[in-house]
């Protein structure tokens, strides 16, 4: 079956623009995670959903970052008024349920000019 | 704050040899550890995991060792192949907390 997919794969934004990044988890996966990966660094946790409920958003760096998963499947990470420091790869991961393996998507590389 | 770290940022190994990638963690409350492999342009790929009630776990060509006394985790890859070239991350999770905390990664290069 298909893995986690993310779109777009690459996004270039001018500073101040809003962006929306999409994640399609593996069908049936209850949990969904967003991570931010800066160049040469490990992924850093942003937020976590269990079905449509956002249970942990402690990693979101500012109120410019917003994530949603309204129907418990597809998720969107929105960044408002992008800044250069937002440039990174944004990774989405999903898993069947608690205490199971997280499967990662290929990521969206965001470049803010 | 507490975080997962790695001893070596790069490692070069001759094809066919065994490789060992090390990781130190500082959060004694962590009870689940995972090794991921990340190739260029791709997301992290699960390799193997281990829970804190174990000290060793083996997979296909890979072994993870956990030493809770010194808070050390290692990944052993046997008979390395060119396809093993990638960045390897260890990650930890605390019970009751769903997020993974990743280290900065070790780049493994296999020399033909």
Image: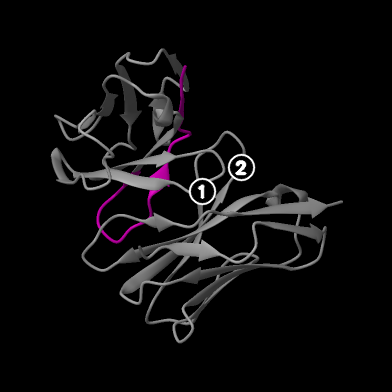
Label 1 packing within 10 angstroms: few (<14), some (14-19), many (20+)? some
**Residue A20 versus residue B101 in the image, above or below:** above
| Distance from the alpha carbon under mark 1 to that under mark 2 | 8 Å
Chain letter of disc 1 in the image: B
Residue B65 vs residue B102, the one in the foreground: B102
Where in the figure is residue B83, as x and y percent of width and height?
A: 71, 48
Residue A32 in view here: no
Label 2 packing within 10 angstroms: few (<14), some (14-19), many (20+)? some
The circle on residue A113 is: none
| SS at circle 2 | loop
Contact (CB < 8 A) between labels 1 and 2?
A: yes
**Residue B99 versus residue B18 in the image, above or below:** above
| SS at circle 1 | strand
Chain letter of disc 2 in the image: B
**Residue A96 versus residue A89 in the image, above or below:** below
Which residue position holds label 2? Answer: B39
Which residue is painted at 32% across and 15% down in the image? A16
Q: Which residues are magenta?
A: A94-113
Q: How is the image coloured?
A: one colour
Image side of residue B72 versus residue A65, left or right: right
Residue B53 vs residue A1, the one in the foreground: B53
Where in the figure is residue A74, as x and y percent of width and height?
A: 25, 29
Residue B74 in view here: yes
Q: Is residue A112 magenta?
A: yes
Where in the figure is residue A83, as x and y percent of width and height?
A: 37, 24
The circle on residue B45 is: 1
Q: Earlier in the sequence, mark 1 or mark 2?
A: 2
Which residue is painted at 24% across and 35% down in the image? A62
Where in the figure is residue A102, as x and y percent of width and height?
A: 38, 50
């Amino acid at each position: 079956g298909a893995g986690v997919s993310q779109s777009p794969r690459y996004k270039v934004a001018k500073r101040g623009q809003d962006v929306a990044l999409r994640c399609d988890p593996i069908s049936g996966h209850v949990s969904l995670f967003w991570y931010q990966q800066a160049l040469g660094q490990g992924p850093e946790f942003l937020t976590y959903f269990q079905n449509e409920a956002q249970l942990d958003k402690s990693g979101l760096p500012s109120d410019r970052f917003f994530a949603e998963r309204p129907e418990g499947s597809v998720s969107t990470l929105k960044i408002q008024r992008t800044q250069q420091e937002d440039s990174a790869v944004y990774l989405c991961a999903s898993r069947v349920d608690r205490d199971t393996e997280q499967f990662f998507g290929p990521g969206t590389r965001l470049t803010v000019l | 704050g507490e975080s997962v770290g790695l001893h070596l940022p790069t490692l070069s190994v001759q094809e066919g040899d065994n490789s060992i990638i090390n990781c130190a963690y500082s959060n004694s409350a962590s009870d689940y550890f995972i090794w991921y492999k990340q190739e260029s342009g791709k997301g992290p790929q699960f390799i193997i995991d281990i829970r804190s009630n174990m000290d060793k776990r083996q997979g296909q060509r890979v072994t993870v060792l956990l030493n809770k006394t010194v808070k050390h985790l290692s990944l052993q890859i046997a008979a390395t192949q060119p396809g093993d070239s990638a960045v390897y991350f260890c990650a930890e999770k605390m019970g009751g907390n769903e997020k993974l905390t990743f280290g900065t990664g070790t780049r493994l290069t296999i020399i033909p």
